[in-house]
Image (tube, coloured by chain):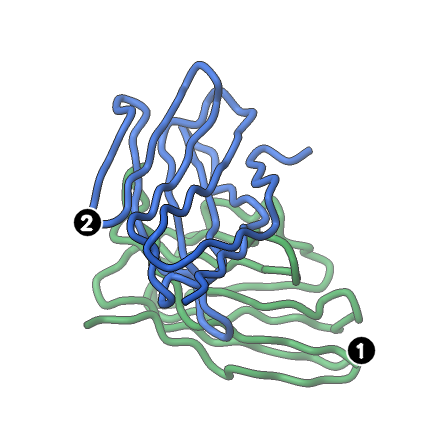
Amino acid sequence: EAEVAQSPRYKITEKSQAVAFWCDPISGHATLYWYRQILGQGPELLVQFQDESVVDDSQLPKDRFSAERLKGVDSTLKIQPAELGDSAMYLCASSLSGLLEETQYFGPGTRLLVL
Amino acid sequence: DQQVKQNSPSLSVQEGRISILNCDYTNSMFDYFLWYKKYPAEGPTFLISISSIKDKNEDGRFTVFLNKSAKHLSLHIVPSQPGDSAVYFCAARGGNTPLVFGKGTRLSVIA
């Protein structure tokens, strides 16, 4: 069964350092999402890609976060510099074409701890 | 302001009984609703969905009910099994809005 892949699964870093997360969506899925889930909360959308283009990054803290999907396949989310409040689970999801009633499939996530 | 609310942080049910998880929403633009299940250290897994043109959708042991006038939906699991123990997230979207999640309800099914 096709799955969304993410790496690393866990990351511990010190504040002010740079971190990067990688996501490989299900093959053929044009739409890719990055979510952040803080402990005790539901996932919140950070950025949505349609192929290689950003279609929604309104909740992405652009002073420190960046995301790219250069070839419209896999994607990288970067934080520089990391802050204590960035400790969270970072989830990647994909869907076929981003239509309203399409299911988003999630990867296992990257748990980030900033010390 | 939370647009999707799951007011019960946790729920305990005996094996074999019915589990009912509730969700309320405030945005009248929402017209597609989903339930996801999440085990520790894993990503959310899609469970069941419902469009606003329906008031019920059933898939095996799982049934979702939608009451648009009350802006309320619920997930029924019958019969509940120990493997159903997880955190359940209600999510909604509509128009150009992204998927909005509730805070989740932790279900514990006791054998």
**Residue B5: percent from the left, percent from the top?**
58, 37
Q: Between marks 1 and 2, how big is the CA–CA gap? A: 49 Å
Q: For the residue carrying disc 2, how many other residues have a C-alpha within 10 Å: few (<14), some (14-19), or many (20+)? A: few
Q: Of the residues shown, which amino acid type is indicated by label 1? A: Ser
What residue type is disc 2 on?
Gly
Relative to A97, residue A11 above or below: below
Residue placed most toward the observer, A41 or B80? B80
Task: Name the spot of residue B100 as percent of width and height, x first.
Answer: 51, 41
**Comparing marks 1 and 2, which lies closer to the viewer?**
2
Q: Mark 1: few, some, or many residues within 10 Å (few <14, many ≥20)? A: some
Residue B5 falls left or right of residue B98: right
At 59% from the left and 48% from the top, the residue drawn is B103
Closest to the observer, B60 or A105:
B60
Instruction: Tell me if A41 is positioned left or right of B35 in this view.
Output: right
Residue at the spot 50% in from the left edge and 45% down from the top edge: A56
- Secondary structure of the residue carrying numbered label 1: loop
Chain letter for the blue part: B
Q: Quadrant of the N terminus of chain B?
A: top right
Q: Which residue is mark 2?
A: B60
Residue A4 image-quadrant placement = bottom left
Seen at 71% across and 64% down, the residue is A64
Tell me what residue is drawn at x 22 percent, y 71 percent.
A2
Q: Which chain is green?
A: A
Residue for badge 1: A16
Say which quadrant the C terminus of chain B sits in: bottom left
- Asked if the residue under mark 2 is in contact with the one under mark 1, i.e. CB atoms within 8 Å, the reply is no
Callout 1: chain: A
